[in-house]
């Protein structure tokens, strides 16, 4: 094998290795995104249910539930941004 062929083979081998590494990372990222989405969906259901409670409650109890709801909503906002970034 000539020196040029050896260099070309080395380049091809390196590209294959990089491709394989990226493929694994993509697979893991997909799993990570799915896990994050499932967690966010649970939080969404919690926020949605609490919103109904806030609508029915009055006074201090509603303020406390509303504060907790705002924190959960902020967590959702950050989580959705994380998922968008991963995609």
Image: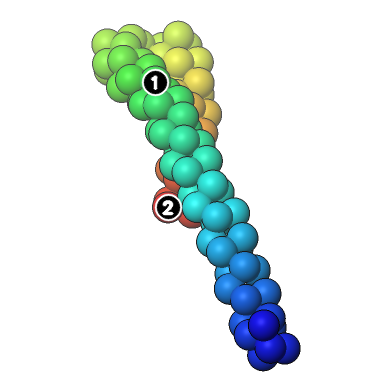
The residue under the point 50% across, 37% down is 32
Q: Which residue is mark 2?
A: 87
Q: Which residue is mark 1?
A: 42
The residue furthest front is 1
The answer, for residue 44, to whether it is visible in the render is yes
Q: Position of residue 41 (x, y in %)?
A: 36, 26
The residue under the point 46% across, 29% down is 35
* 7 and 51: which is toward the camera: 7
Q: Is residue 2 above or below residue 49?
A: below
Relative to 24, 62 lies left or right: left
Q: How many marks?
A: 2
- Describe the element under mark 1 as helix, strand or loop: helix
Please identify the quarter of the rendering in which residue 43 is found. top left
Q: Position of residue 13 (x, y in %)?
A: 62, 68
Label 1 crowding class (10 Å Cα cut-off): few <14, some 14-19, many 20+? Answer: few
- Describe the element under mark 2 as helix, strand or loop: loop
Marks 1,2: beta carbons within 8 A: no
Q: Position of residue 49 (x, y in %)?
A: 31, 15
Q: Is residue 20 above or below residue 68?
A: below
What separation in Å lies between label 1 and label 2 (alpha carbons)? 20 Å
Label 2 crowding class (10 Å Cα cut-off): few <14, some 14-19, many 20+? Answer: few
Q: Is residue 4 above or below residue 32?
A: below
Relative to 77, 16 lies left or right: right
Relative to 34, 20 lies left or right: right
The residue under the point 52% across, 29% down is 71
Tag of residue 3: none
* 32 and 56: which is toward the camera: 32
The residue furthest right is 3
Q: Position of residue 24 (x, y in %)?
A: 54, 47
**Which marked residue is nearer to the observer: mark 1 or mark 2?**
2
* 44 and 74: which is toward the camera: 44
């Amino acid at each position: 094998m000539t020196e040029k062929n050896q260099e070309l083979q080395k380049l091809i081998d390196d590209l294959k290795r990089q491709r394989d590494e990226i493929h694994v990372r993509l697979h893991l990222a997909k799993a990570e995104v799915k896990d994050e989405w499932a967690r966010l969906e649970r939080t969404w259901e919690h926020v949605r249910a609490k919103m109904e409670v806030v609508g029915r409650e009055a006074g201090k109890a509603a303020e406390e539930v509303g504060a907790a709801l705002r924190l959960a909503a902020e967590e959702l906002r950050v989580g959705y941004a994380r998922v968008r970034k991963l995609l």
